[in-house]
Image (cartoon, grey):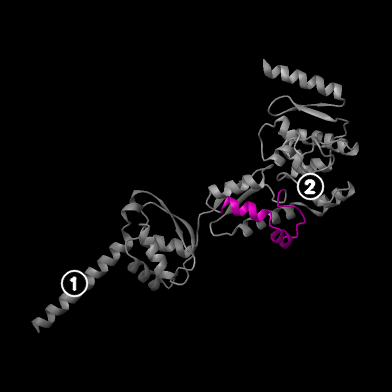
Amino acid sequence: MAKRARHLVATLLLAVAGLAAVAWLGLVPTAAVQAAARRVDVPANDGLLGIARHLSDQQIIRSPAAFAALALLRGTARHLKAGEYEIPQNASMLRVLQLLESGRVIQHLVLLPEGGSVVELAHTLQREGLASAADIVRLAHDRTFLQALGIEAPSLEGYLFPDTYLLVRGLTPQEILARMVLRLRAKLTPEILEQARARGLDPHQLLTLASIIEREAVVRDEMPLIAAVFWNRLKLDMPLQADPTVQYAVGKERRALTRADLAADDPYNTYRRPGLPPGPIASPGLAAIEAALHPAPVKYLYFVSMDERHHFFSTTITQHNAAVARYRLARAR
């Protein structure tokens, strides 16, 4: 009887020790998590044991077996969600499991600014670890992808609406770009498209003109004036002579141009070719689109930068040349 009692006590002690060990594994954070919050990518299609091993390798949990057992006990073993997670400092294994159960992955705020280009967006997405810049640029020029989106254009340039997007890791480049195209479609209302038709512009031409206005203007108040200059030139079959189109042609976005650049034989060089270029050069915002549809009622044909924000507008080449000389002299002082 005494032997049996000792055996029972020993069994109970082992059970208590086991429960204490499980509690310690489940409630006490790893040294790495005690030190600071951690980020971890949970791969898709890894299964419960694969996820547990990955978390252990990243020093997020202490025991893969204990993590798997806890998930089985909670009935969530088949419902853990892949993605990028922020593991709070001092998070227990139970807290880590609850995060993966909830699917509250990190959302990245990605800004495509007004006047931003596909190349600039590609670099932003790469910096955030959301996509390869090369993949984004390649896909933006992929004819099959463009056709799938119903876009008849050389690329997605100008068809991605400038806005702030909440993106998560795991989205494909196709999903990211398609979301931005759909946002543009929602903004181009039937009223806007009808106003464009009334001015003789199809959606592609509207976006092309608006993109040039967007890249030339710094303050919104000047957009209708800049739009008027371009409309007046188009009516007279004068080259638009817009520096941003040449920057786009020679790959010098937002950088100073040389005489050689201005002489480049390229369809986007509006110093050498009259009319609109083949497509947009950036993503125009609604203000630039509205300016393209509603230019100011002025006869200006020229403008030159007065400073980093404002332009001086002229009707004649004599006025323009005088303004250029005046502002060059001011800069030289």
User: Which mark, by number, is residue 13?
Assistant: 1
Could you say where residue 290 lies in the image, as x and y percent from the top left?
Answer: 79, 43
Which circle's residue, 2 or 1, is located before the other in the chain? 1
Q: Which residues are magenta?
A: 131-157
User: Which quadrant would residue 7 be assigned to in this image?
Assistant: bottom left
* Label 2 secondary element: loop
Q: Nearer the viewer, residue 319 or 180?
A: 319
Q: Quadrant of residue 318?
A: top right
Please state if 55 lies on the left or on the right of 24 as rendered. Answer: right
Amino acid, disc 2: Pro
Name the spot of residue 139 as percent of width and height, x first: 65, 56
Q: Position of residue 224 (x, y in %)?
A: 80, 36
Amino acid type, label 1: Leu
State the residue position of label 2. Answer: 278
* Depicted 124 relative to depicted 319: above or below: below
Q: Quadrant of the N terminus?
A: bottom left
Quadrant of residue 312 in the image? top right
Work out how far the residue at label 2 is from the one at label 1, CA to CA, in angstroms.
80 Å
Q: Residue at x 40, y 50 (%)?
A: 37
Question: Going 53% across and 49% down the picture, which residue do you hit?
Answer: 128
Q: Secondary structure at mark 1?
A: helix
**Considering only vertical position in the picture, is 136 above or below 321?**
below
State the image coordinates of residue 298 (x, y, percent, origin top left): 87, 31
Tell me the tag on residue 53.
none
Quadrant containing the C terminus in the rendered view: top right
